[in-house]
Amino acid sequence: MIVNGVSVDDTFAEAFAMRGTRLIITAQTLGWARTAAVSMTGFATSVIGCGLEAGIECELDGARTPDGRPGIAVLLFATSSSELAKQLERRVGQCVLTSPTSAVFSGIASGRPLPLGKTLRYFGDGHQISKVIGGRHYWRVPVMDGEFIAEDTAAMSDAIGGGNFLILASGASQALAAAEAAIEAMRRVSGAIMPFPGGIARSGSKVGSKYKALIASTNHAFCPTLRASVDSELGPDVECVLEIVIDGLTEEAVRHSMQAGLRAVCAVGAAGGILRLSAGNYGGKLGKFHFPLRALLP
Amino acid sequence: MTELVLRLRAAPAFRLDLSLLTPERLAGQTADAVARLPLAYGRRSVPVGEWFDVRGTAGPRILIEGDGVRLDRIGAGMQDGQIRVEGGAGAYLGIGMRGGRIDVSGSVDAYAASGLVGGLMRIGGDAGDYLGAALPGEHRGMRGGVVIVGGRVGDRAGDHMRRGLILAEGACGDYCGSRMQGGTIATLGACGARPGFAMRRGSLVFAGPPPSPGPTFNDAGELPLGFLVLLARSWKELPSRFASLSRPSIRVRRWVGDLAFAGQGELIHWPG
């Protein structure tokens, strides 16, 4: 399959079941809501080393937040509910509670509860106040700029992590430009995030390593400098490969996000130095969810 | 929608206990069957038909018409459906109610919404003493739900209240929120003496004239409280004047107390 001069491999992205949640972080200004959100979703690129994968989903104006202030919706994904709960408590406690004027709310209406204010309230040292307002339970925790308001629990949902595709280009500039175009399009899709820096990963990995201590190592088949040394997937014309990884609350969200990204890359096309599109998988043996690239295009 | 109508023929001489007449207890019964049901009347038991003309079919809605000042325990323990009272109601309106809705166009007697767990109660007129309070000897008052009073609220509203919301569009009597352990009472009118007496937790919000806190409340001064936005937004869908409450700021004056007890309650004056 060739779209706008870009060869699309007959392959699929293999994704896995995860646990996910959405939080809404608000603050006096959008800038401070974003600061808290960026801080909270930092060092959250991969469950391999960070414990969870997280990112900013979208900005929200006051009409779409519980307290009428500007806010940011963030999505968080982990491989287990216990890890998600642990990471949530740490990250909200260290990055949102500490951020000036912030408040945090559940962004999913129903689902299995994840402790949010329920555990953070203890920071109030007994001065915290519980309020049930409109059927939702909040905590008012006294802090030095007033009160930190946190909803008692967030809701956890089944989610999908590891949707992905690879952009193979004639050079780094071309790959980066196409990847940036893809990320811009993908950020308009709700319910999904791209957790790597700027949404883009240059160090795609494979499972395992020659070193026993490592559970993942470089995806040698897609490394241009190894094409003469290993069983490479790359022809002589490919100088750069970038990967975009997608986590979503639903299979539909991951599919729409991948579709938006793949279309944006194809729009750049061969004229922009894009040669091939591929995806990472494990032969279909590990992940429950498969996203064939050709079914998502044109 | 099916509706069961009970028209009171004359004012009873003694208290009449209507706790049996809730939508879930009467579900599927004909008007004749309902008319034969026994009601506690003073020390006697009398059939519903002795005091009421009954028509319609029992379903999710019940309409009670007439001067109901001696009709006690309307909607007691109700879980679902709607009871509408065209007129007044007696004591213990909706006691132990868990869900559904009660609308009373007139005034009600004492202990309305006592032990309320859930649901919505709208009283068009005045409410007697001990609205949403615990019964004597009990330690648990209102534990959830919403009560809206269009008129004046009597003394000791929310006594031992644990959770839930009382919105008083008129004035409140003395000792409003006494021994309160949680929840919120808001009023648009004036408040009587010693609001929040012996309260341990909970919020009393005065959106009209400022309160006169007792000596065991400390003035915390003026400051913005963000949770008031959540509170006001939750009122938007309610059938109350509070739905259109407009406040330019969340900067309020706050008193904390009752310091003779746990002292984690608050009196909030939220001026317009």
Image (cartoon, coloured by chain):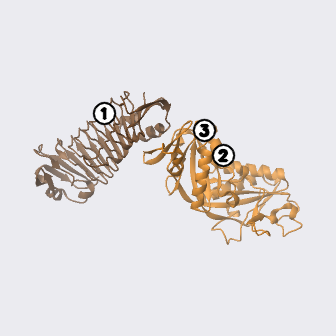
Chain colours: A orange, B brown
Residue B236 in sight in this render: no
In this picture, is B235 found above or below A232? above
Output the chain of dot 1. B
Sort mark 2 into few (<14), some (14-19) or many (20+) by Cα contacts within 10 Å: some
Residue occupied by mark 2: A39
Sort mark 3 into few (<14), some (14-19) or many (20+) by Cα contacts within 10 Å: some
Q: Which mark is residue B240?
A: none
Sort mark 1 into few (<14), some (14-19) or many (20+) by Cα contacts within 10 Å: many
Left or right, B222 with reference to B10: right
Mark 3 element type: loop
How many angstroms separate mark 2 from mark 3 (CA)? 12 Å
Residue at 34% across / 50% down in the picture? B117
How many angstroms separate mark 3 from mark 1 (CA)? 38 Å
Residue occupied by mark 3: A100
Output the chain of dot 2. A
- The residue closer to the viewer here, A227 or A3, is A227
Residue B135 in sight in this render: yes
Left or right, B245 with reference to B149: right
Question: Label 1 is placed on what type of residue?
Answer: Cys
Question: Label 2 is placed on what type of residue?
Answer: Ser
Left or right, B264 with reference to A173: left
- The residue closer to the viewer here, A80 or B82, is A80
Residue occupied by mark 1: B172
Q: Measuring from the top left, give residue B201's x and y in whole percent.
A: 40, 42
In this picture, is B171 found above or below A273? above
Marks 3 & 1, CB-CB < 8 Å contact:
no
Q: Measuring from the top left, give residue B101's x and y in whole percent.
A: 31, 48
Mark 1 element type: loop
Question: Label 3 is placed on what type of residue?
Answer: Pro
Residue at 52% across / 44% down in the picture? A124
Mark 2 element type: helix
How many angstroms separate mark 1 from mark 2 (CA)? 47 Å
